[in-house]
Amino acid sequence: MDPIPVVVKHQGKKHEVEVDPSSNGETFKYQLFSITGVEPERQKILVKGGQLKDDADMSKLGLKPKQIIMMMGTPSGDASSVIEKPKEKIRFLEDMTEAEAAQVEGATPAGLQNLGNTCYMNSTLQTLRSIPELQEELGRYSASSGESSSANQLSQFGLGGLGASMDLTASLRDLFRQMSETQEGFPPLLFLNALRAAFPQFAQKSKDGHGYAQQDAEEAWSQIVSLLRQKLKITDTESETDKAKDTTFIDKYMAGKFESSMECDEPAAKEGGEEPVISGDTFFKLNCHINAETNHLRDGLAAGLKEQIEKRSEALGRDAVYTKTSRISRLPKYLPVHFMRFDWRKTTNKKAKIMRKVTFPNELDAVEFCTEDLKKLLIPVRDKIRDIRKEEEDVERAKKRQKRMKAGEENDIESKEPLQKKEDKKKAAQTKSEDTEMPDVEYKTEAQLEAERAASILAAKKELLALADPKLSADEGANQTGLYELRGVITHQGASADSGHYTSFVKKLGPKDPVTGKRKEEDGKWWWFNDDKVSEVDAERIQTLSGGGQSHSALILLYRAVPLATIEEENKA
């Protein structure tokens, strides 16, 4: 069939186009896309019988030569649709240095070589490295007196030699920097030497005399954090008073506070005038106690906040059992949780592993473990966040439904009915008179509905910010919502702490916007660090780490506070 010459009118211009009668509407739209730059899905072409559909048979439209066809629609972005010469020269991966390739968006991060039963250390380091604030603060660290200036300079370039720096903090700084410049398995030899120098327990030899013994990752975590607390000093500015105070990175971002009450279990002590002892304590992790009744992380955390101690009672004049009950008065931004899976067995002189399955959530609600005063501040904020999330999910569902409707999967009228017609139908059913004049129904466009939803969410976010307590908001390193998101997991595979294998899982960050520097939405996947082997896994893999056998079981969870800051930024935008 011969092509038919037609004239397409669009935005005051006329375009002569030849239509192939054997083609369909979609082909014709792509012809117009090449001429006008308007994407096919944004085109509205008026032909006899209505709007041109993608599957329309062009031979059945009765087109005549020189017939005028109207087209409406604009490109999705006039400026962005213009192809411009790149401002920077394009560089291919094979032309980059190893350090440049390692810093490309989406590059696989570096693993750590196992230097002989050092998987406990490797998994701990990979999880600590997932804290961006820690990496930034380490980058600013300089040893005050622990190493000479020349040794410090050599260490900065990784040339310090085996014994050049016994400063564990400086070694950690250098190691993290070196890991950012490679995608290969890196040997953490300098840090290992510094760790064994600072804590000789990690230099213990294996019982068979061959190499070093396996160690507990939780002990490595606790010792490294305690030393960082001593070394990594920072100056914190209080937002309310603008007064600078000296503190440590760990105290600001990773330390929580308990309010504890210790009371004798025997009523006679209270009758004898003995009052409960109130105290305050600092913690750097929460312990999840595991017994025959522990099925979920919440059960173990609740058990860990109650402790029985035997001590002398002055009122009774003898030893008695006391119960110490703790409640959290400050939630840190980063909250490690330790599953107490290793129990010392006198019969075997080993730390045996408790195999029981204990599930844990991707989002932890820590409000129930807090003091009454902190609960009053956090509950309104937490509940408002959940309301906003539900509203945002409803908007996403509406958008998806609209896409399906455009694709022809749903009827247009049916999609509008739940939003606009339900009330009209009720009123119509109540009105039986045939002479009643029905008012004209004005339907809202999808754009109007979307604008209303966006305005509603924005108003809710403003309400959320108004609910936030100013004093709590001023504490930058604290959790201001009571909610935590899981970011890292250290796992153990095997039957005892002195054997087996440790690995770690770290949630992938979203890609960074090159203009604003902000992180975009995450894809939900995780990095699995198995010494020098690094692989990408789905979120479902994390749910298999609850234990129940000798397979990989969660030993330490790293939670990060669900922030208010991102909501505030969106509102200001």
Image: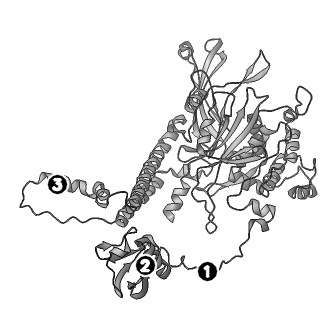
**Residue closer to the observer: 357 or 371:** 357
**Residue closer to the observer: 68 or 81:** 68
Q: What amino acid is at disc 3? A: Lys
Left or right of residue 525: residue 191: right
Mark yes or no: residue 245 visible: no
Q: What amino acid is at disc 1? A: Glu
Residue placed at 43% from the left, 73% from the top? 23
- Label 1 element class: loop
- Label 3 element class: helix
Distance from disc 3 to disc 2, alpha carbons, whole Å, reads 51 Å
Distance from disc 2 to disc 1, alpha carbons, whole Å, reads 32 Å
Q: What label sits on residue 84 in the rendered view?
A: 1
**What is the basis of the colouring in this image?**
one colour
Distance from disc 1 to disc 3, alpha carbons, whole Å, reads 57 Å
Q: Are marks 3 and 2 in contact (CB under 8 Å)?
A: no
Answer with mark 3 or mark 2, whichever residue precedes in sequence.
Answer: 2
Residue placed at 47% from the left, 78% from the top? 31
Left or right of residue 374: residue 6: left
For label 3, the residue is 427
Q: Position of residue 360 (x, y in %)?
A: 58, 35
For label 2, the residue is 20
Left or right of residue 53: residue 255: right
